[in-house]
Amino acid sequence: MLSKLKLNQLYFKDTTFANLMTKRIFNVLLIANPYDAFMLEDDGRIDEKIFNEYAALSLRYPPRFTQISSEEEAWAELEEISYDLVICMPSTDKSDFFATGRNIKEKYPHIPIVILTPFSHGVTRRLSNENLSAFEYVFCWLGNTDLLVSIIKLIEDKMNLEHDVAEVGVQMILLVEDSIRFYSSVLPSLYKFVLQQSQDFATEALNDHQKTLRMRGRPKIVLARNYEEAMELYNKFQDNMLGVITDVRYPRNGKKDSLAGIKLCSEIRKKDPFVPLIIQSSETENQVYANRYAASFVDKNSKKMDVDLQRIVSDNFGFGDFIFRNPTTNAEVAKVRNLKDLQNIIYSVPSESLLYHISRNHISRWLYSRAMFPVAEFLRQITFDEVVDIDIYRKIIFEAIVKYRKMKNQGVVAVFKRDRFDRYSNFARIGDGSLGGKGRGLAFIDNMVKRHPQFDEFDNAKVAIPKTVVLCTDIFDEFMESNNLYQVALSDVDDDTILKYFLRAKLPERLVEDFFTFFDVVKSPIAIRSSSLLEDSHYQPFAGIYSTYMIPYLDDKYEMLRMLSDSIKGVYASVFYSDSKSYMQATSNFIDQEKMAVILQEVVGNQYGDRYYPSMSGVARSLNYYPIGDEKPEEGTVNIALGLGKYIVDGGMTLRFSPYHPHQILQTSELDITLKETQTRFYALDLKNIGQDFSIDDGFNLLKLPVKEAENDGSLRYLASTFDPYDQVIRDGIYPGGRKLITFANILQHDVFPLAEILKLAMKYGEDEMRRPVEIEFAATMSTEMDKSGTFYLLQIRPIVDSKQVLDEDLSLIEAEKTLLASNHALGHGIMNDVYDIVYVKTDNYSASHNQDIAYEIEKLNKEFLDKNKNYILVGPGRWGSSDTWLGIPVKWPHISSAKVIVEAGLTNYRVDPSQGTHFFQNLTSFGVGYFTINSYMNDGIYDQDFLNDKEPAFETKYLRHIHFDKPLIVKIDGMKNIGVVMKPE
């Protein structure tokens, strides 16, 4: 009995078709006299004919033929070029190509050599007297170029057989025949059929590249010419045998045996009652044996023998459509063309028909012949005896197909086909152009999740990307050109006018049906996101320049079509808005080189009445330049918030944590910080707004709501804590009364959902595979049931690129006399070379009792810097921003907002534990401000105050000195090692 557990654990590993058929024949040496060579080619175009044969069958890499007519030429060629196959054409003249072939074999034993002979009695007589041990096969030329294709394929199949069967369980067809004349006509016909069938099953592939690769999984054809060879092949590969075609009379024990084929069938039937057998014979009385061994019979004398054989192979070996039959009457009860059909029909096939096909392994054979190895392998192992109830079997087949199709769709950019796109489809493209930057990033993470099964190992969490369809850049080109939009787009008119023109234009008509299919499958609000060629390109951060719209899901698909069309045109128009144009100029790009793909994607979230939003959205960065406590820079940092991600983009108050230390969160470490520095509002999509007032503002239909509203929606179950005003404590979870604080406590402290673990995996693999630090956007929804389950969606991955952050020198090697400030506890990263001023608190006669007065002086000075739009370095004792004036100077962020580097410098007589900027942490990280901690009296860092004291101040008060330099104070911070220096001006 197959338990539910076993099915849940079922992990289908994708077939690596690229690893199949790796040994190929590329160069063929043809040794024949000029007349035979000409006859062979018909009219001297063998390469072209082979090429056409290959092209017609969608095969790649047709071999090159080189023709020669003497042994001397053969040696010269073999010295020059590496040949994979030699074909000798002996004729009735004096030249002895048999001897030539034997000589070549002696010197080049690894090259297969084949005899191809015109069919005549003279040659037949000669063959019977020749030693043919040096030759792989002997074929008989009957004037059909197909034979050359089948010779090459037969030898390639033989070379790859063992590896491909072991690798994925590729199937084989065994042909047992000793008549050269006969197998020379059967093989071309059989190969043509199998290759055409594999073209058909390749339609299960999701794009052209996959299609070509899938054909490598076609069944192999293996030729045996006597009983022993046939039995050896059968015994070795019986688990991968699609079927056996056998003659009746051929050698057994070294002698012709008139019933060898029948004995073979008898042996095979003892081992496998159901493997399809075909007996072919020119003696019709052998039909009796066919009935005895449940085999099909083909009459070799029949004029339509080829057709008969193809039909029987098609019906019995699992090719073509799968026909469910009534076992009693043999009448057709259902027909299945592909896996999706099988999935749809499995619950309605009559029980007796399903039982009949299952017990004979028909379904798994059909899947094998179509190169769907993982699911075929799985279904073949389940014999009917294990399952008492046929409906359990239906469920097993259904779930195995679903699992396999999900796996196949993941990590692949499929070509969008209306009849194929369904709820198991993941990522498809419409058009042939580029996917754009975001599109490529999505395809990359989808593939990354597929390749690392660890993402699949969480009991209560699924990891995925939202269902996605990309309109490639060629649709943008077509839209722009067919509507003559470039003139207005590149002009200097205002953004509203550009949008008006774009909204009036028409999208290609053929997309309408595709959009309807997408609506039917997604059945949720849709995000329309920009994915331009330059966006997320590795060296230019273009993120956030173009529009992203969201539309609600409606039952009226024509209304949805209107909203979707407007949104796509709105994204297209945003390429030409004035901000984009000036950004292009600033990054030295040309606007007319920018092309826009558009991503249509289900919006992650749950519906709460008339609004829709996710439980959380966030951004993870794999490098943390502001580590606090025992965090390490390489462990990364995450910012999350309730609701749509626009809140984070707009700079709202998010919760920051390191996924390696989810229990240590600065913002929730103290009551007053928690109350002050947690999220108070969130964004949701307004499902009532159907875009009548469509505008440049892509957030026109988003609601910015107080957190209280989410409490009313019931969406805070695992996300919030409750402030108890009576006891002045915060309790994790939702309790009546009291303000709800977005702390994500149950998820981060109590592991209700494995958010931190998933983020660790995503950052690790993302960074490994991009070979550089990454930024990942994500969203997650918790189930509205009480089961603590949820889905984590990866929305975007991009490399962290910031020119400031390119720092490749070892700061610890800088000489002390060149440094004004040096810290071994520095936060931030990069190089700043635009700061000319330093403001420091005088330490002579310093007393903490003056801290409040010092704060007022700094506030005044900071305002002057703000007015001039300049920055400075601020140095002082104790903790900056402390509300306790004995511990530090009690400034608030607006009072020091022009400081580019802030330094806590401990004094011998005034020692306070360093704060590492905790009071301003959000601002430090948002504005990329450097933060140094220096205790030079303990030899921890450098602060050369004497150097500053010797300079003439630009401004001085009782407590402060402001020094201005003509050359910049170069600041260098290595965020990975937490070392920071400020150089003395040169």
Image (tube, rainbow, N blue to C red):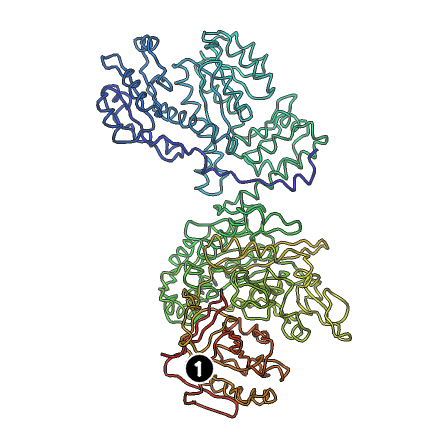
Query: Can the viewer see residue 513 in this picture?
Result: no
For the N terminus, the image quarter is top right
- Farthest bottom residue in view: 958
Question: The C terminus lies in which quarter of the figure?
Answer: bottom left
Q: Position of residue 131 (x, y in %)?
A: 34, 12
Q: Which residue position holds label 1?
A: 870
Secondary structure category for the residue under label 1: loop
Of residues 605 and 231, the one drawn nearer to the viewer in this rendering: 231
Viewer can see residue 766: yes
Most foreground residue, 449 or 298: 449
Residue toward you, 271 or 52: 271
From the viewer's perspective, is 157 left or right of 761? left
Where residue 388 appears, as percent x and y from the top left, is: 72, 30
The quadrant where residue 35 appears:
top left
Could you tell me residue 365's position as x and y percent?
Answer: 56, 28
Locate residue 745 relative to residue 597 in the image: left or right: right
Q: Residue 912 vs residue 129: left or right?
A: right
In the image, what residue type sits under mark 1? Lys
Residue in the image at 34% along x and 20% along y: 114
Please provide percent x and percent y for residue 832: 42, 73
Residue drawn at (54%, 51%) of the image? 516
* Residue at the (41%, 64%) spot, across then down: 808
Q: 742 or 704, which is in the foreground?
A: 742
Density class for disc 1 (Cα within 10 Å; few <14, some 14-19, many ≥20) is some
